[in-house]
Amino acid sequence: DKVPESVRAGCHGRMFEDTDNLALAVIPPPSTSPTTIPVAGPIVLSKWRELLEVLGEASWSIKTRTAALLCWSLLPTGQLFSCSFAVMPIVKEEKLNKNPESFDAVKKEVEASKYADWKHATVDAAKKRAIYSSGSYKEFQDIVATCELNPIARNEFSRPARQQTHNRALNGKENRRGKAASPLVDANGPRIRARDFERNLRRARTDAERMELLCDLGPARVVEALKGSDKAEYVDAEVLLYILEALRSAVEAGHAGDEGVTRGILEALLRDPPVARTISRFLTPEERGRIRETGVLAGVDFATLQLISK
């Protein structure tokens, strides 16, 4: 059943064999006696099986020549025979599961198929477009490799982060004069990403502008934005130094309204394990000494300052 129709039609129901996806058909000429094939055919086919084990992964041309020599040496002298070859396609397909376990698996499979179709169409369109627009093969490869990326709009480079907290009662409590706010009170604002926080911090030209940004966020959100993830083991030491220098400038300037927030931010930073680990491992002894001095001036308790290793 595995022999193709072309080979089967050439054999006319006579001797053929399928061995390892390769069909060998011994086809006699019209003048040959019908009794010749039953005698010579099995001999050729048995030898052909033995030779296939020896040949193994040999090329198609070597197998073709070997079969021709085999037929020439074993078939009766003076009679002309021909050998036909055909590759047997074996399609391995997974069994159809008519009863899926859950609809989520079917949904994921459909989504994966949709993405594969979209990717194939996108890459194919990029190749057809790059044939006429690219000046070199390297440029052709670059166009095809980046065809799945979405272009970045110009306004996305300088878009400010959304940091406004529309909680008037809480903002009024923090800005009330004559009474320092609790250092651990924080606004329930949206989560700020680490790269947005770093960009806004670097954009600030002076320590006063950086301190204003830190006060707007509050102690807990400053630590959250600095880490970026709860699984972070360390923080960016350079960004941490920006924050510490802004806090030191605020303490040395003696801003009365920012004393509680400054002390709260500094305590929150020193008590956070990733921040404390970064201070002890990546900052110099001089920088750690300045942090202790800033903590003393801000009124940080002695137990918190002891978390900084010398």
Image (cartoon, rainbow, N blue to C red):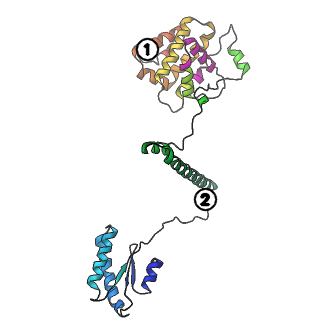
Residue closer to the observer: 182 or 188: 188
Residue closer to the observer: 64 or 273: 64
Q: CA distance from mark 1 to mark 2?
A: 60 Å
Task: Give left or right: position of 161 versus 24.
Answer: right
Q: Residue at position x 57%, y 37% from top? A: 151
Q: Are marks 1 and 2 in contact (CB under 8 Å)?
A: no
Secondary element at image label 2: loop
Q: Quadrant of residue 199?
A: top right
Q: Quadrant of the C terminus?
A: top left
Q: Answer yes or no: is residue 303 visible.
A: no
- Residue 261 point in image, percent of width and height: 60, 14
Q: Answer yes or no: is residue 182 visible.
A: yes
Secondary element at image label 1: helix
Main secondary structure of the magenta stretch = helix
- Residue 220 point in image, percent of width and height: 59, 23
Query: Which region is colored magenta?
Result: 202-222
Work out whether 211 lies above or below 225. Answer: above
Name the residue beneath numbered marker 1.
287
Task: Give left or right: position of 19 versus 179.
Answer: left
Name the residue beneath numbered marker 2.
101
